[in-house]
Image: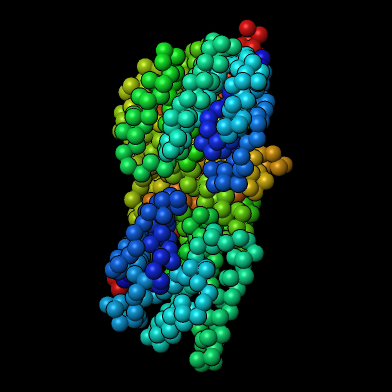
Amino acid sequence: MKKKVLLMGASGSGKTSMRSLIFSNNPASMTARLGATIDVEQNHVRFLGDLILNLWDCGGQDAFMDSYLTTQRSTIFQHVGVMIYVFDVETREMNKDLEYYRDCLEGLRQYSPGAAVFLLVHKMDLVRENKPVTFGKKHKELQVASGDADITVFGTSIYDESLYKAWSSIVHTLIPNAAVLSKHLTTFAEVCSASEVILFERTTFLVIATSTSATEDIHKLDGTRYERTSELIKAFKHSCSRVREEFHCLEMELPDFTAVLDEMTRNTYVMVIAHDPSIETGALRLNIRMARRKFEQLQGDGHVL
Amino acid sequence: MCCFISLILYVRSGKTSIQQVLFENLPPKQTFYLETTTRIVKHTYDTVIPLEIWDCPGTITVETLGAPLSQFLTIIFVIDIRDLYNQPISKLVEFIVAAYHENPNVNIEVFVHKAEKLQEDDKIENFRQINERVTDRLLDISPDYEQMPLNFHLTSVYDHTLHEAFSRVLHKLIDSLPFLEDLLNVFCANSQSPKAFLFDIASRLYIATDASPVDSATHNLCCDYLQMLNSFGPLYKSASASSSRHRKLLPPVLSVPSLSDHDQESPGRTTPSAGASNSKQRAKDLFYPSAAALLHPSTPGTTLTYHLIMEHLALLAIMPTPVFESRRGLVEYNVVFFREGVQEIYQVEQEARSGG
């Protein structure tokens, strides 16, 4: 199953940087070396085994943009599953950006009316004062520019976890059986006496699904924990790759919780968090091993649909 | 007694950045926004030994320091790697001579800092030149200075060189270092571990390591691992369950006498992750966090272990995965043995400090 993802936005807004960070396991400091994207760079990213993200990184220089909107119009905007439009928060040419954005939206309406639209207000790290206010203002502006189109806006930066939050919710819309996965994760959490179970995609470490449980309210866990976890594990994976090792599994017994992060299926990792002090990491690992087959099966089923 | 360390030299050479990145956990990217230090700022930091770090402004002279140089055990000079010209070098030499005259036993360290500003080749060339010029200048003044204990380190806040250099500086101040190293050697030999570090958790400086040479790739990996665990710590903190977890760290001071009576309370008998069901009861009162990361696929695989030793200290060791998986109990036992040793050393030092 192929899903076409358009990555658009003005030149230098950070499209290729975020792509390299999420899909190529490069650290944020490496993005300075990336050059401008010429025309369209197509990438096939295997996500969850059978789901293939056909990522179109569209160079944002005016000449390219004009050509996307005219001669290449049908090629670009056909069969789009998701369009991600990136805005540099500090841009000086917001009006021009918005004009191109509206044109793209029009093209999308014409060729792929069902596509989801995500807007990323990027480079939030450059905003020194009062980020929420700046973001709020941009959000409103984008809402107005989008008219009646259904959009989702995120403030992002490659230097913190916000990028993972945005991309996790983007891929979430592309996964066919997210709700079923979530239900099974909840059952799995109960079996493990765990407070929470999170399922990650293997290469990107984006969150695919989480358990939902009643106990969540009692624990009042940190709201940014999913994307922070993605960020931390990705950073550590990168450290491992520098010494030619590959991260495989992590278990922790820390003062506030016990957790195991291990392979679930060929394409996913699972993290089990327990707050009950009598739960041992060994037991959690055993449970994960036992659950593997069921989840492989679930994943298989999801893609037959 | 406190160990004094002072950071001296030059406007905007990066002294405060060093202090903030190491001890206040400031992300390196944020150091750009730090303001210039205009007066001496004293920071205290407690690890195996209590440290007092004086962050001095770049305009400091021997006279304006406000304390005799002989009080300091270590003086760290921070020089920007691009400052290989006459004036900064002579100022550095002047200060080194003054410090040496006041106190010939002082450890003098030079951090050639902001290494990230230059390309790899230039970096090494500039470092070598600064090193050579300072040494030549000192020998010109007097041939006696050849004996001077002077060390140069190439550092940057953007990688692990700063942590490694500062660790080495710290080692000279730790009196118990040979004993800690011996303990680590014993641990490594008995756990088939090729490398083990005793880290100060918050600053990610290593206090001691075993006798095998430190390869910086391994050191960096351990540093990153510790940083990840530090960040994970508060991430899944539960508002309600923390009280029910009820597993508090034991105060670092041991009640050594009548060990047999106190068997139940002795931390040496408690390894929560050992998995023995009968330890559960005791594990509730006494708990030492631990973690393990399994690395793949280089056969037979490597495991990075983490064990809390004392409130501020953790043991990080690298061992073959088969050893960790199949002989985990023994590894845990060795950790307990190591922990008792370190705690005993710490206790003796505490007594000596309070007695002296």
- Point out the residue furthest to the right here: B299
Q: How many marks?
A: 0
Left or right side of A51 for B351: left
Can residue A183 be spotted in the picture? Answer: yes
Q: Residue at x 57, y 43 (%)?
A: A31
Image coloring type: rainbow
- Position in image of residue B265 (x %, y %): 36, 45
Depth check: give the residue in front, B222 or B255. Answer: B222
Depth check: give the residue in front, A99 or B121. Answer: A99
Tell me if residue A100 comes above or below residue A26 in the rendering.
above
Q: Residue at x 38, y 29 (%)?
A: A138
- Position in image of residue A274 (x %, y %): 43, 28
Instruction: Specify the quadrant that holds the N terminus of chain B.
Output: bottom left
Can residue B278 be spotted in the picture? Answer: no
Depth check: give the residue in front, B346 or B112. Answer: B112
Q: Residue at x 62, y 66 (%)?
A: B122
Left or right side of B118 for A146: left
Instruction: Specify the quadrant that holds the C terminus of chain B.
Output: bottom left
- Position in image of residue A89 (x %, y %): 42, 36
In terms of image quadrants, where is residue A43?
top right
Left or right side of A171 for A148: left
Depth check: give the residue in front, B127 or B302. Answer: B127
Q: Residue at x 34, y 34 (%)?
A: A134
Left or right side of B300 for A177: left
- Point out the residue furthest to the top here: A305
Tell me if residue A177 comes above or below residue A122 in the rendering.
above
- Position in image of residue B205 (x %, y %): 47, 58
